[in-house]
Image (cartoon, rainbow, N blue to C red):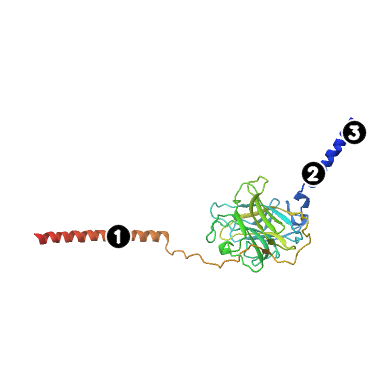
Amino acid sequence: MASLHQLHIAHILLLLATLLRAAEWNTKDFLKREHSLTKPYQSAGFGIPNWDFSGNTMVTSNYIRLTPDQRSKRGTLWNSVPCKTRNWELQVQFKVTGTTKELFGDGFAIWYAKERMQDGPVFGSKDMFSGLVIIADTYSNHNGPHNHNHPYVSAMVNNGTMSYDHDRDGTHTTIGGCEVKFRNVAHETWLAIRYENDKLTVSHDLQNKNAWAPCFSIDGIKLPTGYYFGITAATGDLSDNHDVITVKTYELDTPAGVSKDERADILPAAEYFEPPRDHKEDPAPSSLSGIKTFLLLMFGAFCCVVCVVIGIMIYQNQQENSRKRFY
């Protein structure tokens, strides 16, 4: 009887463990390999399965370098399979390094876009795009006035009608962002882009603790299915190495009452997006250099001293004349 009782308890424990495992939701069970990328990257032949690259991109066994630490370089890496998943999460492991401490740039971008493999000015991809872009802007000598520092991670949703204002770091079309000091850290960094039930959430793992820290979250984001994932980078007068290590894409569960069907017939939109403000030029900088300004100040001070001395001399001369007339 005791053995039967123990066997019965063991069956109950096994059943409970099975139910717990079934109830525990793990995104690894939904890994989309056709949209993912892990080293050593190359297949038996040339190229990367399901991925295309162009520009200055260099593929090694440990990383994919989109740009070297050289000026005026561009590199692209695009998934060749359109994403038909309604809810998804994209996790990108990357590393940005450079030899300079204060001047560096320009940065990289993670895309979910209709257009792929099209070179352009937006961190190596085309402007006036359709879709979503997450921009990791590292340009240290940032353009225009801001209330944040760089590196800065931001998002833009476009239906093909808006231009990314590179001269203002896209501040007129940004829907959210945060500072992430990922440059020249000792370890690789992760960015997670989660799109679930029309909500966009961007997180990061900067401390290498296998835990996500929030960057920003926005409701009311409409994205169609059938677009492509991509990563691009660019350098200008300033430069950095922009390396991609791993890309993992997960299909997320669709809650009850929400259709799992594809929706390829909508335009990208952000519900709370404000129309871009007019582009306003910064005030023209003074044509005077620091040395010229210093010399002008010195000249002005000298003139003041001369005027004071002359005034004193005139006053003393008047006093002397007055004494002579008195006697």
Name the one closer to the observer, 198 or 72: 198
Give the residue pinned by disc 3: 4
Q: Earlier in the sequence, mark 2 or mark 3?
A: 3
Residue 36 in percent (x, y) is at 74, 54
Q: Which residue lies furthest to the bottom in this view?
A: 161
Residue type, label 1: Cys
Mark 1 / mark 3, whichever is N-terminal: 3
Disc 3: CA contacts within 10 A as few (<14), some (14-19) or many (>=20): few
Badge 3 marks a residue whose secondary structure is helix
Q: What element carries label 2?
A: helix
Residue placed at 36% from the left, 59% from the top? Answer: 297
Measure the alpha-carbon separation of dots 1 and 2.
87 Å
Q: Residue at left 81%, top 41%?
A: 17
Q: Mark 1 points at which residue?
A: 304
- Number of the label disc, if any, that sits on residue 232: none
Can residue 136 be seen in this snapshot? no
Amino acid type indicated by mark 2 = Leu
| Left or right: where 4 falls relative to 169 | right
Count numbered badges in the picture: 3
Q: Are marks 2 and 3 in contact (CB under 8 Å)?
A: no
Q: Is residue 307 in view from this perspective?
A: yes
- Identify residue for label 2: 20
Q: Between tags 1 and 2, which lies in front? A: 2
Q: Which image quadrant: the C terminus?
A: bottom left
Q: From this view, report whether residue 8 is shown above or below residue 195.
A: above
Disc 1 residue crowd, few under 14, some 14–19, many 20+, Cα 10 Å: few
**Which residue appears farthest toward the front when viewing the image?**
257
